[in-house]
Structures are given as C-alpha cells and as structure tokens.
Image: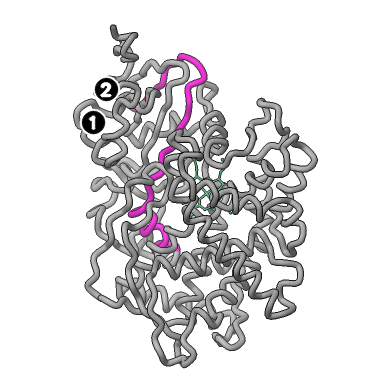
Amino acid sequence: LWLILGIRRRLPGEPPVENGWIPYMGCALQFGANPLEFLRSRQKKYGHIFTCKIAGSYVHFLCDPFSYHAVIRQGRHLDWKKFHFAASVKAFGHESMDPSHGYTTENLHQTFLKTLQGEALPSLIENMMENLQTVMLQSNMLKSSSSEWEVDGIFAFCYKVMFESGYLTLFGKELDGDKTIACQQAQKALVINALENFKEFDKIFPALVAGLPIHVFKSGHSARENLAKTMLHENLSKRTKISDLISLRMQLNDSLSTFNELSKARTHVAILWASQANTLPATFWTLFYLIRCPAALKAATEEVKNMFERSNQKVDPKDPKLVLTREQLDNLPVLDSIIKEAMRLSSASLNVRVAKGDFLLHLDNMESYRIRKDDVIALYPQMLHFDPEIYEDPLTYKYDRFLDEKGQEKTCFYRGGRRLRYFYMPFGSGVTKCPGRFFAVHEIKQFLSLVLAYFEMELLDSEVKVPPLDQSRAGLGILQPTYDVDFKYRLKTQ
Ligand code: HEM
C-alpha cells in the first residue's frame, strides 16, 4: 500500500519524513503558502533535519547553519547541475545547456565568471553609470520646472530606471540610436516593450519552475517569445556597446552549440531574467527602507556627498557625468550595510542540491543521516536571516546592522556564542552562488549614489507601513512587495 500511494517510510538512519496528505504534491501547498512558517514548525517538531515530500520529490531540509558546510562544500555525492539546467529549460524553452546532453560544449559557469567578475567589472560599471544618469534625468522622469515634485511609486520608479539601464548595459544600444530623435524614440520604445514583456513573463516564472507548461499561459508565453525575437542574433548584432557577457555568449552559441536561432535567443532571455528579476525588487526594498528611515538617509547622503567631493566631482544634472570607480564603490560601507539589510529582510532563495547516489550526510553535531539517490537537499537561508539569535529583533530594519564599531563592514555574527560562517546568503552558496553578485551590488550602489546626489526624496505618507512580501515567489530570490508605495522626488538645488 505504501508503494501504491507513493509514500515513503522512514528507514533506520534517515531523517524524519512527512509525506503530506495529497498524493504526489505531498506538503507542496503548505510549504508554498508560507515556507518560513512551515519550516520553523517542522524544525520544532523534528529538529535540524527532516524530509518533506514536495511535488513528487523528497526534499531534506537542513536547518542548522553550522551544518550548511556539509552541503555547500561541493562533495562528490551532490549534483547542482541537474536541477539548475532543468529549471532553465522549463522556464525559457531553450535546449539543454548541460554539455552532457550534447547540444553544446560551452562551460556556462566559466562564461559567467569570465564576463561578470574581475577584469570584466570596470566596463560594466562605467556603462551602467552612464546609462543610469541618462535614464534618471531624461525629460519624462522629471517635471519641467525643477522646483516641482514628481510623484511615482517607488517600485515603478526603480523598475523603470534599473531595467532600462541594466538592459542597455548588457545588451547595448541600437547602432545609430543616438543620431536622430526618431532613432532615440525607437530605442526607447524597444526598452519599454521589453520591460512590459519582462513583467508579464516574470509573473508566470514561479509556475514554470514548478513544472507547468508555458502553453497554459497565453500572455506570459507570448511575452517570452516577444523578448526572444528581439534577441535573435541577427538583431543583437545590429547593436553597439554590447557587454562581454552577451557578445561571448553569442560567439559560443554560434561556435559550440547546435541550437537553432530561436533557442540561441532564448538563452539570452534567460540572462536578461537572471540579471533583472532579483535586482529590481532588491533596489525597491533598498530605496524604500532608506527613504523611510531618516537616520539611514542622513548617513547615506553624507557618505555619497563626501565621496563625490573627495574625487572633485560636481553634481550637475545639466551635465550629468558623475563617475565611480570599482575601488570607490567598494569603499561605501554605509550603502553596503543599507543594501545588505534590505536584502536580509526580503530574500527567500532556496539552495538546492541533488544526491547522485545513496550516501551518508555528516552534520556538525556528529550525527549522520542516510540520503537516497535522487533525493533533494535544500537550505532555506531566510531561516538564518530571520533568526533572533543571529539578528536581534530580526523584523526590524536597522540600516547599520552590517557595520562594526569603526563604521566598517561587520563580518562577525554569532549563534549560541559560536561564530557563524554562513549568516547572509541572498546570492546562494558554493558553486551555484550568483556569478553576477558583484555587479548587482555595484549597480544598486550606483543607483543609490545618483538618486541621493541628484534628488530630494520623500514618502507621500511618512507613516506608511512596510508592504508584505509576496510569498508566491518564495524560493526564487528577492521577493516583491504585494503593493507599491508612493514617493515624491525633485532635483536638488545644488
Ligand atoms: C543565479 C541572486 C543579480 C546573474 C543566482 C542565484 C541567486 C541569485 C540566488 C541562484 C543561486 C543558486 O541557485 O544557488 C541574485 C540577487 C541579485 C542577482 C539577489 C541582485 C540583487 C544578478 C545580476 C546578474 C546575475 C545583476 C547578471 C548580470 C546570475 C546568473 C545566475 C544567477 C547568470 C545563474 C548562474 C548559474 O546557474 O550558473 N542569482 N542575483 N544575477 N545570477 Fe544572480
């Protein structure tokens, strides 16, 4: 009967197991409704590790941060590729990027490291800074008289500014985009369209990762295909100032893969999504909490002002040419703490590995557990981020939480008197850690430096409550707010 119902019985040495009530789905609905609450209640009942059936898979949740290392260290028993490559195929519809499936020999991981980190960063930073200023100060963002306030949603504002700037930084501009007004308008229309399509597709993303076929979602499906059309190589090759990431990926798609043109384009849609889907809500939360907290706003404004003054730069919206080097961006501890605190409060990523075979998982407390082949092991770092033993008053925003007594980056966090190695994980962990994390933090710092330098900003309602996190995306990264919050901004009188 157990076998017929697809129910697992706990064998000696295995973690406690919960099969849930619904065949196949198991605990999926309860987990999906509020993962943090679900996991906390099971942790209370079962301890550091337990197994839940979720949509046909058996998932071992590991809740002891001192044991995270056992999963994050890339042991020979755990596979990270299977899950990630499969999720990308399901969501974006390209052929498999896993070299063992035979469609490409590209080592995607290497491509990302080479084009998003180290020597690749200065040109990404330079282009992003230029694009941010162009977008932020263009006429449709500001009232004609500079003393008049413009009102917008913080979410809407962040999406407009960051999406366009990030899009142009990675995918470049139309070759003759700057020449005539008509060309500029066509370029603008392309980006606005891309943002609309991105939002439409992003809505159905959780359902696609959960395994639903894209054909069920008419508008989400056509949004993805519209994005792909703009990213056909014949269209991308008409653009200038394309990032190293996209130009290398185009070259490798053409030389190492057997993908057809549409499949190649869909791999670029995957990168657009990865580069924006977390950055946009992260920017929202950072700006929202910042404007809402006078002490944070004061400290950040001072830090930014000092930095531009030290490098002898004049803030002039009529001649917007502020620059920030990588070294300067890495030396903004207040902004760094402000971004970390906003992401601590809004991140809900799930770190997943798959067991390659039966093996014994050794935990920090010397206990070992038997894991079966194809079982999933998952870490849910939101449990760390909201742990009152690690972060006092975890639901309260404290902009300086990640600063030490000297005002520099704080790196020592403790639980039960023991120093933690893992305490902040919005970018994932180990080999699957986000390869774009340095660029992501740089671009948010650039955005903040510029809005603080150019604009005065105020909430329309200074007592506004923090909007709840939209749990429908839990597991996928930074959660969105369930509704937008209005603010007003105008150019500062210099
Ligand atoms: C993967 C977070 C911004 C590129 C990931 C993952 C997370 C993440 C959690 C998955 C890690 C895992 O599966 O364990 C974030 C956050 C961002 C951000 C919180 C912003 C605040 C960016 C940006 C880029 C980028 C700006 C690129 C320009 C990627 C890529 C992957 C990835 C390409 C897939 C890596 C692979 O599968 O090998 N990111 N990310 N991310 N991210 Fe980011």
Outermost residue on the top side: it is: 1
Residue drawn at (42%, 78%), measured in percent from left and top? 302
Residue 259: % across, % down: 72, 37
Residue 201: % across, % down: 49, 50
360 in magenta: yes
Q: Which residue is mark 2?
A: 18
Which mark sits nearer the N-terminus, 1 or 2? 2
Residue drawn at (43%, 43%), measured in percent from left and top? 206
Which colour scheme appears in the figure?
A: one colour
* Segment tinted magenta in the rendering: 336-364
Which numbered dot is residue 42? 1
Q: Are marks 1 and 2 in contact (CB under 8 Å)?
A: yes
411 in magenta: no
Q: SS class of the residue under badge 2?
A: strand
Outermost residue on the right side: it is: 255
Q: Residues within 10 Å of mark 1 (few under 14, many from 20)?
A: some
Image position of 197 with respect to 430: above or below: below
Image position of 122 with respect to 84: above or below: below
